[in-house]
Image (cartoon, grey):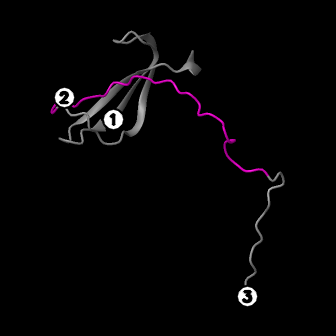
């Protein structure tokens, strides 16, 4: 028994998908990020973060003078020496204000 070819579904509108020709890229804000270092060897190389981050809702100002409303801790290990560490981040999440 021979199989029949499935007919391709045509778009009802006949327009192409994607961004229109001549449209500009959306401008994004550049956010400075602090690299965390291993306290044993000083390397900034790390493995992927493991598990779920711990999160604490707490407002304040970090060392660089930036406001934050969330402190999060993420577990990782150094890619150079294998030392485990917990990276701490101060984040401003507008949806929590």
Residue 82 x/y as whole percent: 20, 42
| Location of residue 38 by image quarter | top left
Local SS, label 2: loop
**Label 3 crowd bin: few (<14), some (14–19), many (20+), radius 10 Å:** few
- Nearer the N terminus, badge 2 or badge 3? 3
Residue 42 x/y as whole percent: 18, 30
Q: Residue visible at 19% across and 28% down?
A: 39
Residue 64 x/y as whole percent: 35, 12
User: Quick one: which residue is furthest to the right in this view?
Assistant: 12
Q: Which of the two discs, 3 and 1, sits closer to the camera?
A: 3
Residue 89 x/y as whole percent: 38, 24
Q: Which residue is mark 2?
A: 39
Q: Is residue 22 left or right of residue 61?
A: right
Q: Are marks 3 and 1 in contact (CB under 8 Å)?
A: no
Tell me the CA gap for discs 2 and 1: 14 Å
- Nearer the N terminus, badge 2 or badge 1? 2
**Label 1 crowd bin: few (<14), some (14–19), many (20+), radius 10 Å:** some
Q: Are marks 2 and 3 in contact (CB under 8 Å)?
A: no
On whether residue 38 falls in the magenta region, the answer is yes
Local SS, label 3: loop
Main SS type for the magenta part?
loop
Q: Which residue is mark 1?
A: 75
Label ID, residue 11? none
Q: Residue visible at 83% across and 51% down?
A: 13
Q: Residue visible at 24% across and 29% down?
A: 37
Q: Nearer the viewer, residue 8 or 97?
A: 8
Tell me the CA gap for discs 3 and 1: 56 Å
Q: Which residue is mark 3?
A: 2
Local SS, label 1: strand
Q: Residue visible at 75% across and 73% down?
A: 6
Q: In the rendered structure, which segment of residues is drawn in magenta?
A: 15-41
């Amino acid at each position: 028994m021979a199989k029949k070819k499935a007919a391709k579904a045509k778009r009802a509108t006949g327009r192409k998908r994607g961004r229109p020709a001549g449209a500009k890229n959306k401008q994004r804000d550049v956010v400075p990020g602090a690299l965390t270092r291993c306290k044993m060897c000083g390397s900034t190389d790390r493995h992927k973060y493991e598990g779920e981050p711990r999160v604490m809702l707490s407002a304040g100002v970090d060392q660089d003078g930036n406001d934050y409303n969330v402190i999060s801790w993420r577990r990782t290990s150094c890619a150079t020496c294998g030392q485990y560490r917990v990276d701490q981040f101060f984040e401003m999440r507008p949806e929590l204000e």
